[in-house]
Image (tube, rainbow, N blue to C red):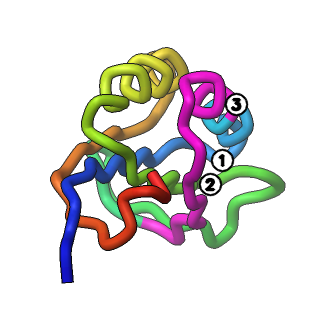
Amino acid sequence: MQTHTAKRIEIVIEKPLEGRLTDALTKAGVTGYTVVPVRGGSGRSGPWTREGQVGRAGMVMVICLIKPERLDALLEAAFAVVERHIGIVSVSDALVLRADRF
């Protein structure tokens, strides 16, 4: 089966910023993404979990698969939201089966 090169971007950000991030990605031409709740993890401040947090607090992960030529626009849009807040952006190479979907 033929595969096609893509980029996988994972953005972990505070839940209250989810709408700002997804709006920015859409304006940058991203046609699809997946949002996943983050239950916990560990960072510079040590381990943390969502348990005991009130309201909309917590973190989400936004996952995008895009064509490599769209990467710069996505990263600029994501960084504009993440730069002043808690968040991580990672980029990795991926192979997809249906390139027309991205």
Q: CA distance from mark 2 to mark 1?
A: 5 Å
Q: CA distance from mark 2 to mark 3?
A: 19 Å
Q: Position of residue 68 (x, y in %)?
A: 26, 38
Foreground tag (2 vs 3)? 3
Residue lying at 33% horizontally and 43% vertically, measured from the top left:
67
Q: What residue would you read off at disc 2?
A: 58
Q: Quadrant of the N terminus?
A: bottom left
If you read the primary sequence from the N terminus, does the residue marked by circle 2 or circle 3 appear first?
3
Q: Position of residue 48 (x, y in %)?
A: 44, 61
Q: Residue 16: which quarter of the image?
A: top right
Q: Position of residue 27 (x, y in %)?
A: 64, 23
Q: What residue would you read off at disc 3?
A: 23
Q: Position of residue 23 (x, y in %)?
A: 70, 31
Residue lying at 70% horizontally and 51% vertically, measured from the top left:
57
Quick one: SS at disc 3? Answer: helix
Q: Which mark is residue 71?
A: none
Q: Nearer the viewer, residue 52 or 43?
A: 43
Residues in magenta?
A: 23-40
Q: Residue 14: which quarter of the image?
A: top right
Q: CA distance from mark 3 to mark 1?
A: 14 Å
Residue lying at 41% horizontally and 17% vertically, measured from the top left:
76
Q: Residue furthest bottom?
A: 1
C-beta proximity under 8 Å, tags 2 and 3:
no
Q: What residue would you read off at disc 1?
A: 15
